[in-house]
Image (cartoon, rainbow, N blue to C red):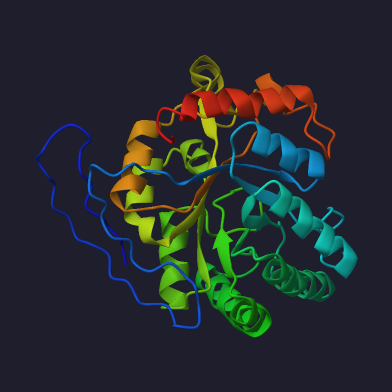
Amino acid sequence: MTRRTLMGSLALAATLKSQSPQTQPAPQSQPRPQPRPRRAPHKEWKPMLGVLGPYTPANVEFAKTHGFNNMILSAGMRSNLDANTITDAQIEQVKATLSKFQMHVSAFQIDGNHIDPDPQRRARQNDFFAKAIDLAGKLGVPYIGTQSGKDSSKPFQAQVDEIVRVYHEKYFPACERNHVAILWEPYPESPNIATSPVGFEALFKAFGDTPYVGLQYDPSHLVRQFMDPIQTARDFVDKIHDVHLKDTEILWPVLRAGGINPVNNARWWRYRIPGMGQINWREFFSVLQDAGYSEAMSIEQEDPLYGADNNPGPDFSPDFQTGFIMAKRYLDQYVP
């Protein structure tokens, strides 16, 4: 079912009427966001602004020093927040660092195929992800950004049904225990069917009114698939609970010369920091503001002009840091 919100213009008094989304209240025991009230236009809009990257004390300090108050932390296998290996003492150290710099963490970022067709790989992924949900609960992190899972050997609806079954059996008990929800990032190169309005519609319909799934919206992925990131955000705004701020630049001369599948494998698009690509950020933020979105938005720095191809980590390299600083300079006009 398409969810539409009322979008007011920034400078005009006229309003366009559209069908408003139906929402289901979350169980009282869960701190999931309720339907967002429209904000009065005189109120200052102040969602949290953050950066995405690995957990290290140096990265947390960088984020705080440069005016960010949120982070999305990489928490996959072999990261500094690996749920298979992290100890209680290390968890306490992470808590102390985040507290020292007054840094909020909106989400973990964890890739993986939750319905992997290989039984052993699936079991390892399911076990690890359930542990990561527990770790998120211990650190007070409300969301985990991931992909839906995918098994291309099965028909589309069968994949949807399998995702629902696995999440209910393997993840939702931990989600309920830890007050954590799973958010899908529309990343198309991963094991993921939550990459478009078609996938979103099918999954949310199948999951019904559960409070444990939603969207970690990244408009850059829709741009390079030639979908409308603004209208899609408007249609699913009540499901958006975390945001990746990343742009996509279409290299039009390259695209026109070789098409979307160029025989010489020329790259016709690239990720950029916000403001350097095709996304109309004024319109995007207007959709979120109009819906009363007040959660976090974090810069995902994958811009090759700012060190994204030369950032060995886990600490951010100087060039990589510059990308965050330049992005924030642009975003300050919209997210004070």
| Left or right placement of residue 163 versus residue 232 in this view | right
The quadrant in which residue 182 appears is bottom right
Position of residue 260 relative to residue 146, above or below, is above
Asked whether residue 8 is in view, the answer is: yes
In the rendered image, residue 169, in percent from the top left (x then y), is placed at 65, 85
Position of residue 258 relative to residue 10, above or below, is above
Position of residue 5 relative to residue 305, above or below, is below
In the rendered image, residue 92, in percent from the top left (x then y), is placed at 82, 63
In the rendered image, residue 163, in percent from the top left (x then y), is placed at 59, 74
Instruction: Name the residue: 72% across, 29% down.
Output: 308
| Left or right placement of residue 61 versus residue 180 in this view | right
In the rendered image, residue 168, in percent from the top left (x then y), is placed at 59, 82
210 vs 323, nearest the viewer:
323
| Left or right placement of residue 326 versus residue 29 in this view | right
320 vs 140, nearest the viewer:
140
| Left or right placement of residue 208 versus residue 138 in this view | left
Position of residue 180 relative to residue 93, above or below, is below
